[in-house]
Image (cartoon, rainbow, N blue to C red):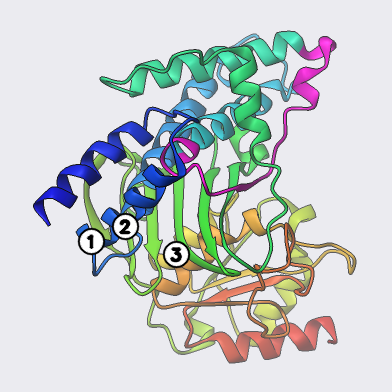
Amino acid sequence: MGGCAALYRRLAAISRLHRPGMSPRAVRLLGLCRSANHPSMPYAEERRIAIEAVEKASFLCRAVQTDLVAAASMDKQDKSPVTVADFGAQAVVTHLLRGAFPDLPLVGEEDAAALREPSNRALADQVVAHVEAHVEAHAVGETVPGLGFAEVLDLIDYGTYGGGASGRHWTLDPIDGTKGFLRMDQYAVALALIEDGEVVLGVLGCPNMPVAAASEGERGCLFVAVKGEGAFQRALSGGPEQPVRVTDVSQTEKANFCESVEAAHSSQSDSAQVAGLLGITADPFRIDSQCKYGAVSRGEASIYLRLPTRKDYEEKIWDHAAGAIVVREAGGKVTDVMGRELDFSLGRTLRNNSGVIVTNGVLHEPVIAAVRKVLAV
């Protein structure tokens, strides 16, 4: 076991340097040693790398906000800062994932086609600059040879995998909640691992979310969950992980719910009718992005409603994969408006599902019944 542990540490160090030439035999040996070193935690290395990747992407997003969004001269209609952060975060996450797990593809929200257009060269240069600065600032003791313009754009393009029902792949939303990002409010970096169509690991970085619920204290928290191992939270800046748990509210009239800030993302009028049927009088907790999943997982809300705004809309897997497993492992339940489990085996969208309902589990059936009555489905 000692020899395997030493080999594991050596191969893991090599893989983190992002060497595309790492041999298939070395990759297989690394996988075998992961299992030998973590027999009761089959996703231990994936969990560690995913946390590191989301941390780095979150720090990059914060840097872009400081450099671009908060600038006094910034035109409020200019969305280029979130574009820089979106592409930059995907490149940083991919750099870590591809270095450690070169055999696993990625379903990402972005591709670099627009950045390759000559008219967008200035924007692309900003993306590259933030990625290079971030990697250098946070990869202590590592060197990243050749990470330049072409390499950063290639990293972004790595996320074009189509997904599916077999094998393992990652899915990433580099910035979930773009309008929240531009308002200096809530947004999330959401990364999940899908295995044979099932989400088995999820990490949510929430750079502006208070570490303590309803607190004005430290901001920036990270949620992580692995199938069968529970859900946890810690400060984005580091420190010990603490388990999180959904509320134990069993009466709908004592519950509260959260929903999207943007009315275009979920039917707020339908949500109000659902609340009326359930006897809920508390004002809705409106918050951007998959931070809503984090809020439910740690008991700030008992219900999250994302009701469809049009019949033909297909939810994207990266908008829900990480958050869904965090809530489930915290004791909650996640389905669509018909009560069906979310199906992550169909590629890049949840085309067999309509809307998303998230609860503490105890309240799920009455919430579903109220939603179906309001939507007449």
Residue 199 in picture, x, y percent from top left? 53, 66
Report whether 198 appears left or right of 76. left
Vertically, is 21 above or below 282?
Answer: above
Label 2 SS: helix
Front disc: 1 or 3: 1
In the image, what residue occupies the spot 64% across and 37% down? 158
The answer to whether marks 1 and 3 mark residues whose Cβ atoms lie closer than 8 Å is no
Q: Earlier in the sequence, mark 2 or mark 3?
A: 2
Please check the rendered image and state whether residue 66 is part of the magenta-colored stretch, yes or no. no
Front disc: 2 or 3: 2
Q: Which residues are magenta?
A: 97-120
Alpha carbon of mark 2 to alpha carbon of mark 3: how far? Answer: 27 Å
Residue farthest along the front direction in this orientation: 25
Identify the amino acid type marked 3: Val
Identify the amino acid type marked 1: Ala
Report whether 52 appears left or right of 122. left
Residue 13 in picture, x, y percent from top left? 28, 34
Question: Disc 1 marks which residue?
Answer: 36
Residue 330 in picture, x, y percent from top left? 38, 72
136 and 219: which one is in front? 136
324 and 94: which one is in front? 94
Split into 4 quadrants, where in the image is the C terminus? Answer: bottom right
Report whether 167 appears left or right of 325. right
Vertically, is 80 above or below 261?
Answer: above
Identify the amino acid type marked 2: Leu
Residue farthest along the left direction in this orientation: 2
Vertically, is 186 above or below 33?
Answer: above
Please check the rendered image and state whether residue 112 is part of the magenta-colored stretch, yes or no. yes
Which label is found at residue 326? Answer: 3
Q: Earlier in the sequence, mark 1 or mark 3?
A: 1
Which label is found at residue 32? Answer: 2
Vertically, is 183 above or below 116?
Answer: below
